[in-house]
Every structure is written in structure tokens, then in C-alpha cells.
Image (tube, rainbow, N blue to C red):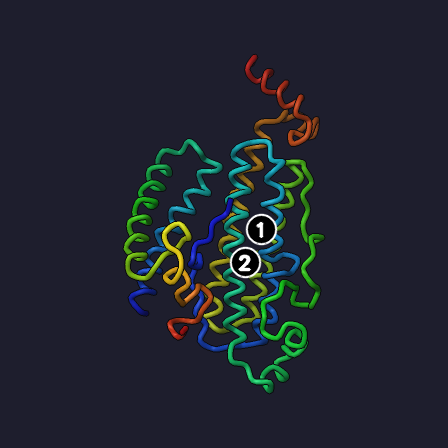
Amino acid sequence: MTDRETLLQKLSALQFAAWELHLYMDTHPDDCDAKELNEKYICKSKELAAIYESKFGPLSPMTGSGEMWLKNPWPWDIKECAI
Amino acid sequence: MFQYEKKLQYPVNIKNPNPKYAQVIITQFGGPDGELAASLRYLSQRFSMPYPELKGLLTDIGTEELGHLEMIGAIVYQLTRNLSIEEIKKSGFDTYFVDHTTGIYPLAASGSPFTAAYLQSKGDVITDLHEDLAAEQKARTTYDNILRLVDDPDVREPIKFLREREIVHYQRFGEGLRLATDKLNEKNFYAFNPSFDVQCNKNCCRRDKQR
């Protein structure tokens, strides 16, 4: 795996943990342990997303536009062969 | 509103194209129990959901399904790269190819184009949640069937991830149904439709306060 893929996988893991807890809290809004864990994963996701974006470009239209936003690979492109 | 994030929920990196697999997996893009139907179902039903937990749940799961639609599109796209006409003819992909080349089009594996008839938005919380529970199980079975047909681990891993998500969503919808019925009269959940009979909802709240 390239550096980009490794970082993206770590970020996806953190975001997934945060998202799973987010869904859980839709039906368990008063679960304090879940809330604490959710906040922890959101915080870590934001930190790692900022690192990823500083190296490999924006993940959302709110963090960058133009050349860096358009830059390949797009999520469905195969590996790093994209031009 | 919705905002795009330039990444997949789970990575898709398929080394070996396989048009036969693509023709089966496209059914989770635009087939009867596919991700497009799932997403449209939940994102449509949410407007008439009477309780905040259910508005949140339908919004969040409907949004996640859009991410799954993108994953299925990526799988089919990668499975149909660099195909020769010989491979297309031999695999049976020619019937798709003639209409769509290797573009991603929402249809079922059997060839029927996507239709909104695959989903319902009934405007009744109990009815809609039962539809959603059934939809998650139907999608889970479809993923089970795909896993029976596909050997390549590069394809199986993201499909296994998507299958797991159906089970988690089923669990959350079950909890949502429980939350809804807990707010209703246990002697007759169907005495009124909390999504429609607004006045009755208010009365019920007042009754709750009096208890």
C-alpha cells in the first residue's frame, strides 16, 4: 500500500467507528459511554483528516477547490495508476 | 443538504476485471433490493416520521446507503475495465454492453431497469419501519447470494462489509420500531397513525403528562 492508501485506511477506520456510534445513538440518545467514545473518534478523525488533506488534497468541497479537488485518483479509480 | 466526501466508506481495489461478476453485482446498484432503492426509500420516508429518533435514523441510514451505492458503482466499474470484445462476448456481458458499453446504469441482474416500484413510502411509521426491516434482510440475502457466486477476495471483502451493514441497519430499525411502539397505546398500536393524525399525537402527549 502507498502512504496515501495507508493514511486513508486509518482515517476510514476512525470515521467508521464514529459513524457506527452515531447510528447507535440515534436509538440510544442517552448512552453516556457511547457519547464519550463517539466524541473521541470524531476528534481523532478530524485530526487525521487534516493531516491527510495537507498531504493529499481536500476530501470535501469545504476544504478545497479547483486543481487539488479535481486531482486524481477519485474514489472509484483503481489504485495509483490514474493520470 | 448533502455534501460529498471524496472517499469510499470501505476501499475497493479489484486487480482482475471480471464482467460476469459485474453483471451479477450491478443488481445491488439498481435492482429490487439494491442500494439506490434503499437510499430513496429511507430518504423519502423520513419526512413523515413523527419522532426525532426516527427522523435521525432514516436520514443517517439513507445517507450511508448513498455511500454504498458509490461502493457498488466502484466495484462494477473496476470489474469492467480493459475488456476485450472477445471477453465481453464470452462472459455474456454483451447484453449489457450493447446498451451501456461499460457505463454504470441502475438495473437488476436480470436486466430490468431501476423503478421506484421497488420501494414504498406509506406515511405510517409502523408500516414504513416494517418495510425497512424487510428491505435490510432482502439486501442481506442478495449479498449472501453474491458471495456464493464470487470467489475473488478483492470483490468479496467489500461485499462482506456491505452485508454486515445490512445486519447493523436491521438492528437499528428494530430498535426504532420499539421506540415508536413504546410511544403508542400497547393495547392497540393501530388506533391511529402518528405520522398523520397530528391532533391525536398531541392528545396522547397530554395523556402521558397526566399519568
Q: Position of residue B9 (x, y in %)?
A: 44, 56
The residue located at (54%, 58%) in the rendering is B69
Vertical side of A35 occupied by A54: above or below: below
On screen, residue A54 versus residue B181, left or right, reads left
Q: In this figure, which residue is indicated by the disc labeled 1?
A: B39
Check disc 1 and give the amino acid type.
Ser
The residue located at (59%, 70%) in the rendering is B103
Q: In this figure, which residue is indicated by the disc labeled 2?
A: B69
Q: Position of residue B169 (x, y in %)?
A: 52, 47
The reply to whether discs 1 and 2 touch (Cβ–Cβ < 8 Å) is yes
The residue located at (46%, 43%) in the rendering is A23
Check disc 2 and give the amino acid type.
Leu
Q: CA distance from mark 1 to mark 2?
A: 8 Å
Outermost residue toward the top in this view? B210
Q: Secondary structure at mark 2?
A: helix
Q: Sequence order check: which comes first, mark 1 or mark 2?
A: 1
Outermost residue toward the front in this view? A66
